[in-house]
Amino acid sequence: MNDDRRSPMRGANIDRAAAKHVPDTPQTRAPTYRLAFADEEFLGREELRPVRLQLELLKPDMALDAHGIDSTVVLFGGARIPAPEAAAAARTQTLAELSHFYEVARDFSRRMTRKSLDGGGRDFVVVTGGGPGVMEAGNRGAEDEGGVSIGLNIVLPHEQAPNAYVTPDLCFNFHYFAIRKMHFLMRACAICVFPGGFGTLDEMFEALTLIQTGRMRRVPFLLFGREFWEKIINWEALAQAGTISEEDLQLFRFVETAEEAEAAINGWQLMGTRDDIPGR
């Protein structure tokens, strides 16, 4: 990211570079002499958590603004769902059976990217968690169409890297799950959830809660694979118990194919929405 603003003040990055060439003395070697914003050890201190939270909020937001991205189509889904050609090596039969959703996600991403490019590339940009499985399929579909896509990766205990299909300049890494989830939703014009595990469930229910409580504008909320979702979540039981209302069951809908999902999003655009909650 380049800062194109013109200021008469000497830039911080100029001083950062200059500080690397100061005379080597006991004083300049002392940790206290380091520029505060260039001192990684200092920035990692417990007391600096509020600053780190703000940095993780600002950096991706500024980058997406610089790329002119106004709205995104969010793809949540399992990292363990294999591509169909790798289904035979899946750790369970169920994962092998779910592998067709890899191609559904890829096809859906192609369609959304085509829609984005037809409109100038500022809207309907696909964003995923940047990992394997369904996330890879989403980024891959965008690349198939010659478009860009976003990957919001996170540091995990095991070694990992973003999938190869994320647009490099739109690939981000996070420490805080909470800030990462904010970035998923800050520009969301549609939320699409494929079968997945704890992470997918966490992302799905946080988004539903924000919409249910009026903290986020209603957007198309699509759950791919009715059989999977109704097997692991008894939605009707929640409504019957009174822990959610019957109306809350209208916050989302089930779809099976990329075509059906695209039609749902296009139909939503035609109908518009009654909500007027500011987006960000």
Image: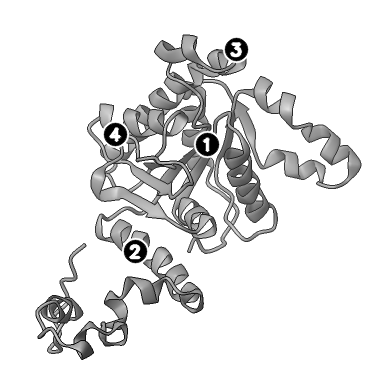
Q: Which residue is mark 2?
A: 59
What amino acid is at disc 3? Gln
Query: Going by the image, does 253 lie left or right of 113?
Result: right
Asked if disc 4 and disc 1 are in contact, CB closer than 8 Å, the reply is no
Of callouts 4 and 1, which one flags the residue occurring earlier in the amino acid sequence? 4
Asked if disc 3 and disc 2 are in contact, CB closer than 8 Å, the reply is no
Q: Which residue is mark 3?
A: 93
Q: Which residue is mark 1?
A: 192
Circle nearer the viewer, 1 or 2 = 2
Q: CA distance from mark 4 to mark 3?
A: 27 Å
Query: Going by the image, does 250 lie left or right of 188?
Result: right
Of callouts 3 and 1, which one flags the residue occurring earlier in the amino acid sequence? 3
Residue 196 at x, y = what percent?
58, 31
User: Badge 2, how many Cα within 10 Å: few under 14, some, many 20+?
Assistant: few
Q: Which quadrant is home to the N terminus? A: bottom left
Residue, x 58% and y 28% (percent of image)? 195
User: Badge 1, how many Cα within 10 Å: few under 14, some, many 20+?
Assistant: many
Query: Going by the image, does 14 lie left or right of 229?
Result: left
Q: Is 189 in front, or is 268?
A: 189
Residue, x 72% and y 28% (percent of image)? 232
What amino acid is at disc 2? Lys
Q: Is 57 in front, or is 69?
A: 57
Residue 82 at x, y = what percent?
46, 21
Q: Which residue is mark 4?
A: 164
Asked if disc 3 and disc 1 are in contact, CB closer than 8 Å, the reply is no
Asked if disc 4 and disc 3 are in contact, CB closer than 8 Å, the reply is no
Q: How many marks?
A: 4
Q: CA distance from mark 3 to mark 2?
A: 41 Å
Is 67 rendered above or below residue 111? below
